[in-house]
Image: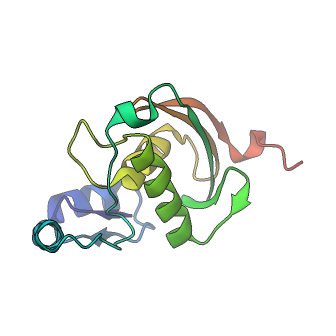
Amino acid sequence: MAHGGGDELSAAIRQLDAALRVLTIDTARLSSERAAVRISGVASRHLLQRPVSDPSVARGVVANLEIRFEEAIPVALNGVPLPLAELVESLSLIGGGHGIGHAESANAPGAIVLDAAYRALDDRSGVVRLELLDGRQRVVAAQPHALVSRA
């Protein structure tokens, strides 16, 4: 679990599940990197930090996402098994293109989508289906691993 909320959030996450590996992201450093990117005009290549489009760019275009979790780790997106870094980057690109994070001025759309999926997941393993539309996301369904067919 990666976050930028500081030591208090890390402690709270560990209380929820001591087995999770917690990584605190230095948000001050990210802010300075964003400023440097704005000044230089060079796009960021950080996997969590992606540009967020204005929701009007994809107005009315729905993105349906299905995230499969195994032992609280996202392992597949829309039925395609992916390494964690590629999965998060894919969520960042898709979410950013659909304006996720625009209202919050947050350039981490993949993290926002994953947060919603984690909150909907009742078990450590299962599938969460989300819909992204007009800068908003909603959980369509969340199924524990035992109810997910492997067809």
In the image, taking residue 112 as reference, residue 81 lies left or right, namely right
Q: Residue 136 location, x and y as percent?
A: 39, 31
The x and y percentages for residue 150 are: 85, 50
Q: Residue at x 47, y 64 (%)?
A: 89
Residue 102 in view, yes or no: yes
Residue at 71%, 47% (x, y): give it: 145
Q: Is residue 57 above or below residue 37?
A: above
Quarter occupied by the N terminus: bottom left
Colour mode of the rendering: rainbow
Does 35 appear above or below 91?
below
Query: Residue 36: percent from the left, percent from the top?
Result: 12, 73
Q: Residue at x 83, y 43 (%)?
A: 149
Task: Give 107 or 23, whichever is nearer the viewer.
Answer: 107
Could you tell me how many numbered marks the image carries?
0
Judging depth in this view, the residue of 133 and 43 nearest the camera is 43
In the picture, measured across the screen, residue 24 lies left or right of residue 114, that is: left
Q: Residue furthest right?
A: 151
